[in-house]
Amino acid sequence: MQDEPIDREVILKELEEIHKLDYDYADGRILGSMCTEAHPFAKEVYCKFLDTNLGDPGLFKGTKHIEEEVVKSIGNLLSLDNAYGNIVTGGTEANIMAIRAARNHARKYKGIVDGEIIISEAAHFSFKKAADMLNLRIVEAKLDDDYKMDVESLKDSISDKTVAIVAIAGTTELGLIDPIDEISKIAHENNIYFHVDAAFGGFSIPFLKEIGFDLPVFDFSLEGVCSITVDPHKMGLAPIPAGGIIFRKEEYLQVMAVDSPYLTVKTQSTIVGTRLGAASAATYAILKYFGKQGYAKMAKEMMNNTRYLKEGLEDIGYELVREPELNLLAFNHPKIEAHELAEKLDELGWKVSVAKCPVAIRIVLMNHIKKSHLKELLEDLKEIY
Ligand SMILES: *Cc1c(COP(=O)(O)O)cnc(C)c1O
């Protein structure tokens, strides 16, 4: 740090220059991200809550109320009347909280000390962090031929050390929904905590179902489901960092509670201590501003774009890994290897990502990608072909 203060105009100019190195969603070239530009209204509200601290809720009763209302609204969307939980930094923190609740619950009520969690090969890497931090062993259930959790393999993976089973509604790589109703039954019969990671799909599946899309049930209407992760900062158009962890029962928060002596409340269950209330307020605002209709309209538009891209790709001769279930698709060139193709696309300015299982170009059709961008992309892909 320099000794003398610097004029704010100079600092702003410097920051703007550096900021130019970042890609801009509005250019429609970011094709592999599950995040998108937040809605302007949500950003406006966010800025009004920049000094709030939900880590000390006795001082911020209003903002705490807002967080509780957002949790209830999202719970409601997921067929739960009285939801408990928090708005956290993202899917990763939400998943860590769910696994921590499961571990503590199993430790308290079943005496399990060296616990295991069962995830599928398609699970998000955040569960590796959770297992590492919480000292749990990961048991990986196989995927079936359709890249979803294989139910028989799940059954084989259960042991007397299992503290949680995790299924996914909208996998990070392919956007697929695991057979959650079957998994819920298995978890319930075996009295095992069941967490659904709907970080990506949680803000689209409920709305799509309501307007007639044939998608499976994945929420709290299934009795085995104990918690669900939903990210407002992905399909919810809330500003980063906004993740949601929704619990069916308050006891899952209670088993994580530690004493917080110098604060206005006696215990704290979140991982983070001091935490900003702005994401809660912004999510509150955007949920009201859009309503179910607004989200349904957006989700449908993205599904239309997904179909447009799928048909365009097939017309040229590219091969889809699988029929897309949500607004995410993966494809390959019959001869060019995916990483090589991704490089060619990168040279043309397209920021795609490569899925690992199976290896394929992966495109997430978020709100910032318009049909005009897809048209240009298809032209470039035709040229490459
Ligand atoms: C994005 C995602 C996560 C991680 O969320 P972050 O907000 O990046 O922490 C977890 N699970 C799934 C299924 C995801 O798509």
Image (tube, rainbow, N blue to C red):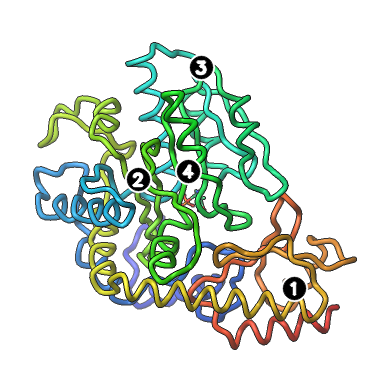
Task: Give whichever of 185, 330 is nearer the camera.
Answer: 185
Q: Mark 4 points at which residue?
A: 181
Q: Is mark 3 on a helix, strand or loop?
A: loop
Neighbour tally class for label 1: few under 14, some 14-19, many 20 plus, Cα within 10 Å: some
Circle nearer the N terminus (3, 1) = 3
Front residue (pair 260, 222): 222
Q: What element carries label 1?
A: helix
Q: Which of marks 3 and 4 is in front?
A: 4
What is the x, y in percent for residue 28?
A: 57, 79
* Image position of 348 (left or right of 178): right
Left or right: residue 63 versus residue 147 is left
Within 10 Å of the Cα at label 4, are there few (<14), some (14-19), or many (20+) other Cα atoms? some
Q: Residue 161's mark?
A: 3
Q: Which quarter of the rendered picture does the C terminus lie within?
A: bottom right
Is 111 placed above or below 19 here? above
Residue shown at 63%/67% (left/top)? 363
Q: Front-most of 99 and 266?
A: 99
Mark earlier in primary sequence (4, 1): 4
Q: Distance between the residues labelled 1 and 2?
A: 41 Å
